[in-house]
Image (cartoon, rainbow, N blue to C red):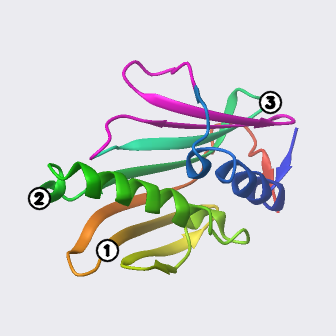
Amino acid sequence: MLVSLVELQDFLADAALHTYAVGGERVAPWNLGFKEIEYIRGTLRYRDSWAGSRRAPGREVIFLLLQTPIWSRWYDGGIRPRFWGDGRLVKEAADFLKESLRYLPVERPWRRGPAFFRKGRWVYTSVVVGSMRSFVGIEWILQLPKGVVFQQIYGGGLVVGKEVPQIVE
């Protein structure tokens, strides 16, 4: 079975708006000690898996026929250590991250969030290089006047095994 890049992008955008960004329901984790959210549409499955909270490395994977990985994104970072003890700030930053991720550009869903989003004293920005096939990026959240309170790097792209690629233009 083949999937087009356009279908894959559309599915990723749809999955993003049904999972973490909107407080999606957690599912039983495949990885011990991780938190996981899943979204299924047709023969595609999206799974987001992360550990931690103030610093929460993780990965997102799209599976074809619900089991063959065809696309992945990793992320690593979180709240800056000097703010770990400020529970209120941590919660506000997490809530603002979720809100920011709801504004991802659907034509470039590998970006994670918009290039720039501001609400009151909070600012989200994301810079990414590449395409759905292969990319790397970084995102920040600033709270004025405190500065950067959250920073995360991310990257990923298509998963290509020994078999014939299952993604078409």
Residue highlighted by disc 1: 142
Q: Which of 32 and 135 is in front in this view?
A: 32
Q: Please state the extent of the stretch shown in magenta in the rendering.
A: 27-54
Q: Which residue is drawn at 20% across and 59% down?
A: 80
**CA–CA distance between discs 3 and 2?**
44 Å
In percent of width and height, residue 128 lies at 49, 73
Which of labels 3 and 2 is toward the front?
A: 2
Asked if residue 129 lies left or right of residue 82, the reply is: right
Of all residues, the one furthest to the left in this rendering is: 82
Residue highlighted by disc 3: 65
Helix, strand or loop status at disc 1? strand
Give the answer, above or below, for where 15 lies relative to 37: below
In percent of width and height, residue 27 lies at 59, 24
Locate the C terminus and report the quarter of the image it occupies: bottom right
Dot 3 or dot 2, earlier in sequence: 3
Give the answer, above or below, for where 92 lies relative to 46: below
